[in-house]
Image (cartoon, rainbow, N blue to C red):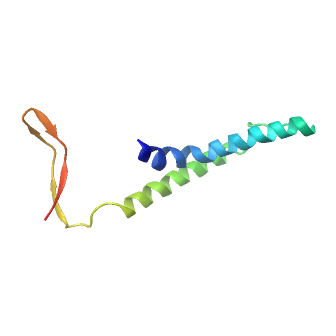
Amino acid sequence: MFRIVITYLLPLFGPLLLYLAWNAYAKHRAKKTGEPIPSIEKGPVFWSMVTGFALLIVSLVSLAMMTGEEPGQGTYQSPRLEDGKVVPPTFKKE
């Protein structure tokens, strides 16, 4: 579960959450100083989502490039049914 959060959710929603936190802080500061209150509608929400998708793609590509076995290092054993239970696929090294 933690791997899913790190590789999928954090890069996707991280920039948006940072922007929303900054916006809440800016609103709080604007109320104290009397400055105009920033609006989410006029802010860069679209670009924070684009940045999140870009980070998601980068994290997935880096995960694919940095993990796994070298080609030709073993034999793939497909999923099978044994004694009424499904045995998940495995990778047997030679």
The residue lying at 92 percent from left, 40 percent from top is 33
Work out which residue is located at the far left of the displayed protein and give it: 83
Residue farthest right in this picture: 34
Q: Position of residue 45 (x, y in %)?
A: 67, 42
Residue 30 sits in quarter: top right
Is 59 situated above or below 29? below
Total labels drawn: 0
The answer to whether residue 42 of the structure is visible from this angle is: no
Residue found 20% across the figure and 66% down from its top: 73
Name the residue at 49% across, 57% down. Answer: 58
Residue placed furthest toward the top: 84
Which corner quadrant holds the C terminus?
A: bottom left
Image coordinates of residue 47 in percent, x first then y, are 65, 48
Q: Nearer the viewer, residue 84 or 40?
A: 84
Residue 37 place in picture, x, y as percent: 85, 36
**Residue 7 location (% of width, % of height):** 46, 50
Q: Quadrant of residue 61?
A: bottom left
Q: Quadrant of the rendered structure where residue 31 is? A: top right
Asked if residue 94 is positioned above or below residue 21 in the image, the reply reads below
Residue 53 visible in the current orientation: yes
Q: Residue at x 77, y 40 (%)?
A: 25
Left or right, 54 with reference to 3: right
Where the N terminus falls, by quadrant?
top left
